[in-house]
Image (cartoon, rainbow, N blue to C red):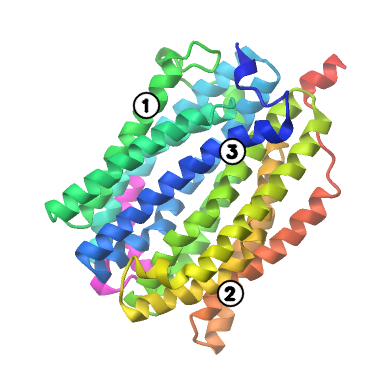
Amino acid sequence: MKPKSLSLTSGSVSRGMLLFAVPMFFSNLFQQLYNAVDSLIVGNFLGGEALAAVSSSGSLIFLMTGFVNGVSLGAGVLIARHFGARDAQSLTRAVHTTVALGLAAGAALTVIGVLLTPQILRWMGTPDDVIGNSIIYFRIYFLGSIPVVLYNVGASILQSVGDSRSPMCYLIAASLLNVVLDLLFIGVFHMGVGSAAFATILSQLLSAGLAFRKLSRCGEAYAVRWRQIRFHGPTLRAVVAQGVPSGVQNSVISLANVIVQANINAFGSQAMAGCGAYSKVEGFAFLPVTCFAMALATFVSQNIGAGQTERVRRGMRFGILTSTILAEGIGAAIFLLAPLLIGAFNGEAAVVSIGVQQARTASLFYCLLAFSHCCAGILRGMGRPMVPMVIMLAIWCALRIVYITVTLHFLSDIRVIFWAYPLTWLISSALFAFYLLRCPIPVSEKNAAEK
């Protein structure tokens, strides 16, 4: 192993975390840009109904892929722990078990997504003028589930050993390809919304191929050797124990978001388009949130593996503070520029009005969103994924749905839905703060034995 070039267990805490987090920031930025470009091109070339079909995709897609991505995050924490402890044998087993799990999950997701898409969309109350395009878009998207899952697995492995730069480069390449293909398929050939999903599949094939090319040629203990891809029983159990809570959390939150989307759908296609446009804008606020949450999970796990307890504390403080400040700054910009940003997706006055209302309700509370996600990342890195799962399922799912359902019964106003988010972010942040203040940092078994 040659861990010094990638390890987060030595050197300046702030410099190490920034060098790790900044490439992930740009990775997420380009991913968000090409998601936004999908909607921009569809909305401007194919109209509001097509935009509604594509814009409502986020909740359903994350419902289907969230579990797999959550398990990948759990596997990444395990890989980071073995990497920090310099345990080459356990690291190799964890990598190959994770890849095997990704292949199996991608195949299952393809079948489930293609078969269940129409039923889920009807259950969501998708309007008749949108559902046809939605079915086409989702079914084509899920036909590409294997490359989507494999890119996430490959990126998770690389990020877990401290290499966030390579996934950034691969995602940038995929993003550029996706933009070119969107313009070609929709702008030039006028192929319809299904071609946007097909462009996404091709771009994910490129990013997954590049990630596994790197992993198969790197010559390190975490290298992927195709003949060794199999399930290793004890490692699989460890991956499941670490990853399933995150996977369940992702899936149930996604299910809650699907229910929220169904409530939005009840307000009509203009509400769907306006909220869908806002969701693309909101994605930019998630950039410092997701990159620092992932950086904290990797940083905490590697340093616990290395027995660096005080370094864990310093990393926690730096990551939370930086993420919340950046998220709030982006939120303030979105609040001020909301009409311009929403209007870029669709110029209809009603669509813009709804999107601006949602933006100006939620954007000044992004600091709470960042704080909750950072705390969840820290707890996953500590090997305590059940805590964020319980808090987020109780607050972001159960409480959010109850609040929306009960309040809409008495007040039929879409702003009821918009306020559900900052209210639940506030409650979850308070619970996370209470827990972390009383939570001791664990010591890895290997380092405890050496001491």
At a point 47% along the width and 40% down the height, the residue shown is 27
Range of residues picked out in magenta: 111-131
Q: Residues within 10 Å of mark 1 (few under 14, many from 20)?
A: many
Say left or right for 214 vs 82.
left
What secondary structure is found at the residue carrying circle 2? Answer: helix
CB-based contact (under 8 Å), mark 1 and mark 2: no
Mark 3 lies on residue: 21
Which amino acid is tagged 1? Leu
Question: 78 or 211: nearer the eye?
Answer: 211
Which amino acid is tagged 3? Ala
CA–CA distance between discs 2 and 3? 30 Å
Q: Nearer the viewer, mark 1 or mark 3?
A: 3
Mark 1 lies on residue: 210
Q: Residues within 10 Å of mark 3 (few under 14, many from 20)?
A: many
Mark 2 lies on residue: 419
- The chief SS type of the magenta part is helix
> Is 259 placed above or below 105 here?
below
> Is 19 placed above or below 200 here?
above
Residue 368, picture quadrant: bottom right
CA–CA distance between discs 1 and 3? 20 Å
What secondary structure is found at the residue carrying circle 1? Answer: helix
User: Residue 95 location in percent, x, y?
Assistant: 53, 22
